[in-house]
Image (cartoon, rainbow, N blue to C red):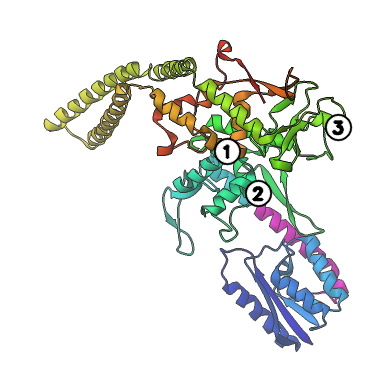
Amino acid sequence: MRAAIYARYSSENQRPESIEDQIGACRRLAGERGFRVLEDHIYADQAQSGARRDREGLGALVAAAQNEQFDVVLVDDLSRLARDNYLMLSVMAELHFEGVRVISVADGLDSDDEEATLGIQIRGIFNELQLRDLKKKTLRGQRGQKERGFSVGERTFGFKSVPVGTIQMDKKGRPRPEGYKMEIEPREAAVVLRTFKAYADGLSLTRIVRMLNEEKVPGRMRAAKGWSPATVSRILDNEKYVGRWVWNKTESRRDPRTGRRRRFTKPESEWVVQEDEALRIVPPALWDQVRSRRQEVRRSWPGGKGRRGFSRDQGGRERHFPTHLLSGSMLCGKCGATIAQVSGRAGGYYGCLGAAKGACENKMLVRRKLAETVILKAVREQLDQAEHIRYLLERVEAEVAALYAHIPETVRTKEAELDAEERRLANFVDFIGEGRGSQALGKALIETERRVEALREELDELRRGSEKVFQAPPVEWIEERLTGMEKVLERRTERSALLLRALLGKIELEPTKGEIGRPYYVAQTSLDTLSLLAPPPGQDDGPEGGSNSLRWWRRRESNPRPDRVQRTRLRV
């Protein structure tokens, strides 16, 4: 009889020689029974779980059996075919249908023997129970490591695992640390932070992906294919970047029909949650801003989990991803409908969408470029007023004063701690000088020296901070910034449109007919001077981001005092 051999081992920790041992056992049985082993039909899967159907060697074995290339399959034991009972019986049923026998060397079971049917069933159940027991023991060991503060297989972009604790040799002579802990990887963390800032500033996932790929920013996996929207989306939703590590939140189950694995959420009572501020990459305010925008953007798409089609509270895509500077920010003064681009001729025209649907009488159109030019010019004129600049500088000076108010008291507290530690250090030196030193005293001396050095460095930093005097930027600097504002807005349409929308609020266009000439629109909007003078989008850090004083401005709420909010009227 023509015989094929199948062998498998499941873990990287097992010896590759296990394959040779299994094949050797099958060859001996073939010699005893007079089978002819076909050298072209020896199949093996290395480091493959017995619960997987999509094994390369197993697939090739079944395909060859369908082509009637052998009469019997020899395995060292049935667990080599599969450890899942359903999978093992399915494979054996396929081979039986093709007229191929299966013989297990260690079990002494032959699928052609009717009396072996019960033994095959029992062996399959036993192998599956072994697999489940192994899974429980592995999970128990991992939970123990988590409770001891170590990480277990939680590789994440932005972090790296480092060995900690005592290094010991395992049974095979390989060094094994007591455990692993996560640390922030600076290069990858900078990419994560940049991704969060870009999304909070209004960039879409595809724009962020294009930016990272064009700059050839290295990732961790799939480097040849570059970044993808799915990867960026997972980064933006990952709680680990704010120091919240959740382990044992999900489990994977294999679909018996397709062989594919799917993830299912476990009960919250089984989660292991660890909060670690030392592993925070994204500041809380930025995380909340991204979460808010993620929820708003999701509402702009139809459907979702458990829903189909459009919903009543669904927003428009233009609200989050504007294509022009004034997209999604203008309302019709007649009916309150959105004014958007209704024609693409001659650079595009804005008009009332309600009128386009026959629900409004306002059929007036305005050229897109004209509307943008007039409104930006009006914004520029408002910002030229000295009163607005003066109010802005008052806010900045008050904020800086509040930020540094605590430093004098902190300096006094640290100076008192330093005096106490220096006296303690002097006492230790005196004891040792008198010959009364000991090993414990030597350790205490070293520890005290470390604390003294740390306190001195901390005091130096605090004193340097208290000596900093805030100097408001000159009016000429602000005017220069405002002069280039129009070019910046035109260069970054999507992000700039979101900024203008936040600053100007809703722009109401009221159609007006003059006594002489053609009708025109009167635009009314609120102008937030304080926020508009913040650095342009994309210039957060570095020399192009302006002086350090400007960074304080962005941390203030964007709404000025009620008496400073004003309505701006302009003719379009």
Of label 3 and label 2, which has the lower sequence position? 2
- State the separation of the CA atoms marked 1 and 3: 31 Å
Q: Please tell me whether the stretch drawn in magenta is mainly helix, strand or loop.
A: helix
> Which numbered disc, 3 or 2, marks the residue closer to the eye?
3
Q: Position of residue 400 (x, y in %)?
A: 41, 20
Is 127 magenta? The answer is yes
Quarter of the image for residue 203 reads top right
- State the separation of the CA atoms marked 1 and 2: 29 Å
- Residue identifier under label 2: 230
Q: Which residues are magenta?
A: 110-136
**Can residue 194 be seen here?**
yes
> Which numbered disc, 1 or 2, marks the residue closer to the eye?
1
Q: Residue furthest front?
A: 516
Residue type at mark 2 is Ala
x 65%, y 76%: residue: 22
x 61%, y 52%: residue: 138
What numbered label is drawn on residue 490?
1
What numbered label is drawn on residue 357?
3
Give the structural element (helix, strand or loop) at label 3: loop
Of label 1 and label 2, which has the lower sequence position? 2
